Amino acid sequence: MTWRATVLTLFPEMFPGPLGVSLAGRALAACLWALEARDIRDSATDRHRSVDDTPAGGGPGMVLRADVLARAIDAAEVSPDRPRLLMSPRGRPLTQSRVAELAAGPGPLVVCGRFEGVDQRVIEARGLEEVSVGDYVLSGGEIPAMALIDACVRLLPGVMGKAESGADESFSHGLLEYPQYTRPQEFEGRPIPEVLLSGDHARVDAWRRAEAEALTRARRTDLWAEWSRQIPPKDKTSG
Ligand code: SAH
């Protein structure tokens, strides 16, 4: 079965958008994955096709109605084995390991919020898993949904050129990626590190590992602490 993303949004015209070009777009055209963007507004029932209302208890902005969104979710008829996600700044921050899990499954339903967010009761009643793309607030869930889908799609079989090119990247082993270089051999007086031109694969691997550890340690104390817990000190290239 083809991996499939079903997106519920008030702006289906935003899709495929960036997912229609380059790696993800070529894979979409080749039917290596499928995308369905459904308009939440199609599930509105009143004359004005309204989807939102003022927050109970007062305050600024509008809230997506539980009944309209629940109807939209039900109308999408996603099978029970597919994860049901709600993009939300309150959610658990998305990680590469969660992305890998989602990519290995049948593909999620992704609900995109707008306005001040969605009525809490539909989150509970439809068992939506809230997922955040970072500690900042965007105006809608569409760009977060695209980020999540893009991260999944590039891991699908046949999407990336070399099967292992996803295996060595940032986060996949709990470390940030080592620095990359390509031609020219010298750029504005800066040479490529000599070891990378040595042809000695063991030395190259050791250098990359040490660089990845040094970068992670300097930039991401959270990842470094986790890595240090998991990897016995004798297996590390730096202390
Ligand atoms: N009032 C809400 C923010 C609403 S932003 C709050 O303070 O939590 C409107 C919509 O944009 C949200 O419903 C969500 O779907 C999306 N969104 C905004 N920032 C996001 C983030 N960091 N991660 C995932 N979704 C986000």
Image (spheres, helix red, strand yellow):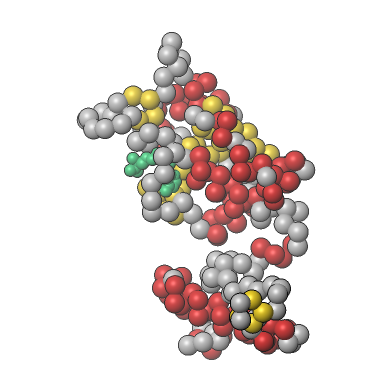
Q: Is residue 42 placed above or below 236 in the rendered structure? A: above
- Report the side of 234 relative to 27 (left or right): left
Q: Is residue 78 placed above or below 21 in the rendered structure? A: above
| Residue 147 pos. (x, y %) | 54, 49
| Residue 44 pos. (x, y %) | 46, 19
Residue at the location (73% across, 46% down)? 27
Residue at the location (56% across, 35% down)? 14
| Residue 10 pos. (x, y %) | 49, 29
Q: Report how many numbered discs are placed on residues in the image.
A: 0
Of residue 11 and residue 3, the one placed in the foreground of this image is 11
Of residue 166 and residue 189, the one placed in the foreground of this image is 189
Q: Quadrant of residue 58?
A: top left
Q: Which of the four quarters of the rendered structure image does ligand 1 lie in?
A: top left
Q: Is residue 78 placed above or below 186 in the rendered structure? A: above
Residue at the location (65% across, 74% down)? 181
* Residue extending farthest top: 47
- Please state, as top left, top right, bottom left or bottom right, where the N terminus lies in the image: top right
Whether residue 122 is visible, yes or no, is: yes
* Residue extending farthest front: 188
Q: Is residue 218 placed above or below 100 in the rendered structure? A: below
- Report the side of 31 relative to 153 (left or right): right
Residue at the location (46% across, 34% down)? 126
Whether residue 33 is visible, yes or no, is: no
- Report the side of 217 relative to 170 (left or right): left
